[in-house]
Image (cartoon, rainbow, N blue to C red):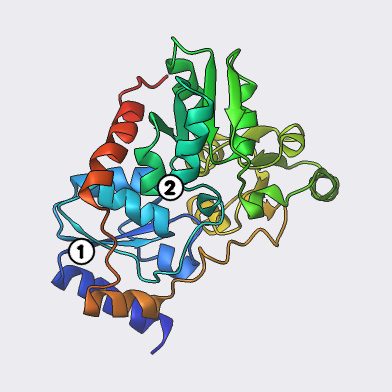
Amino acid sequence: MGIKELQKKIRKLLKEKNAILLVHNYERPEIQDIADLTGDSLGLSIEASKAKVEIIVFCGVHFMAETASIVCPEKTVLLPVISAGCPMADMITAQSLVKKKTDLPGVPVVSYVNSSASVKAESDICCTSANAIQVVKSLVNDDTILMTPDRNLAQYTQRYTDKKIVYWEGFCPYHDRLTPRQVKKVKNDYPEALLLVHPECRPEVINLADEAKSTSGMLDYVRKSQHMEFIIGTETGIIHTLKTQNPDKLFIPADEKMICTDMKKITLTDIVNSLLNISPVIKVAEGIRVRAIKAIERMLAIPRD
């Protein structure tokens, strides 16, 4: 069965099953093209909570499907390929976080949404790459903060606060591999292009950027910008979204090797099988869910700038 036939079959099954297809910006182009919603992990889950559907098919990685289960406990959440994980999220466990908290009594824990449900449950508040600075600044009574699991996001956040940020030694292998040397090479090849990088990149790469933005932040920035050329320092999947939304603009990957293998695991056939079999189901245990959602709700309660 070809791509078009599979896409049509998926849309038909979604309607029959009263389901919604959520697709992260890093997923395969042919999957993004038939999504009900594309975006970042938390934004997709929040939008899904408002949808009057019974089933959520989440095309992303494991922690994203867990977040959907946390936010939408009454819905069935499907992750078409159960092995689609996140190396950074796997760099911290609830047990290791509990141990760290005993070493830092009274220090609030800010955990990136790119973490497991059990880690969120042990955290005081969550953050995204878009709102990490606001979240840390909201903790007005605390001078020291523990941020997990991404050291690069924590160091980026440290630039904008006088608080002491203790960070976990986790990282995204794909963002962390982008080097200043590589960035300078591409900038030299495209001198008119603006460099946009993700806060998960190394500090020395962020120093070379015109802007550091989350995936949703990049999309918004490019849409509003009068500039016509952009070097994109994040997972290359977002370039499909950028081109679709801005067909007249040029997008150059900062590194063509910034491809998350986990984000590319799900295929159209996997989605068909997932809908036919209503599996694999991701369900966060209620004891963990009620604690994890408190951390998410605290974040969402912070007024936006």
Q: Amino acid at mark 1?
A: Ala
Viewer-closest of 106 and 119: 106
Q: Which mark is residue 2?
A: none
Tell me residue 250's x, y (percent). 65, 52
Q: CA distance from mark 2 to mark 1?
A: 19 Å
Tell me residue 223's x, y (percent). 51, 40
On screen, residue 241 above or below 101: below
- Few, some or many C-alpha atoms within 10 Å of disc 1 (few <14, some 14-19, many ≥20)? many
Q: Secondary structure at mark 1?
A: strand
Where residue 82 sits, quadrant-wise, is: bottom left
Q: Quadrant of the N terminus?
A: bottom left
Q: Which residue is mark 2?
A: 40
Identify the residue at horizontal 42%, vertical 19% (top origin): 305
Tell me residue 67's x, y (percent). 33, 48
In this view of the protein, can residue 131 be seen by the observer? no
In this view of the protein, can residue 97 be seen by the observer? yes
Viewer-closest of 2 and 28: 28
As drawn, is 203 to the left or to the right of 67? right
Q: Amino acid at mark 2?
A: Asp
Which of disc 1 and disc 2 is earlier in sequence? 1
Identify the residue at horizontal 46%, vertical 29% (top origin): 109
Identify the residue at horizontal 49%, vertical 67% (top origin): 28
Q: Which residue is mark 1?
A: 19
On screen, residue 88 above or below 194: below
- Few, some or many C-alpha atoms within 10 Å of disc 2 (few <14, some 14-19, many ≥20)? many
On screen, residue 160 above or below 127: above
Query: Extreme top residue here?
Result: 141
Viewer-closest of 148 and 96: 96
As drawn, is 64 to the left or to the right of 74? right
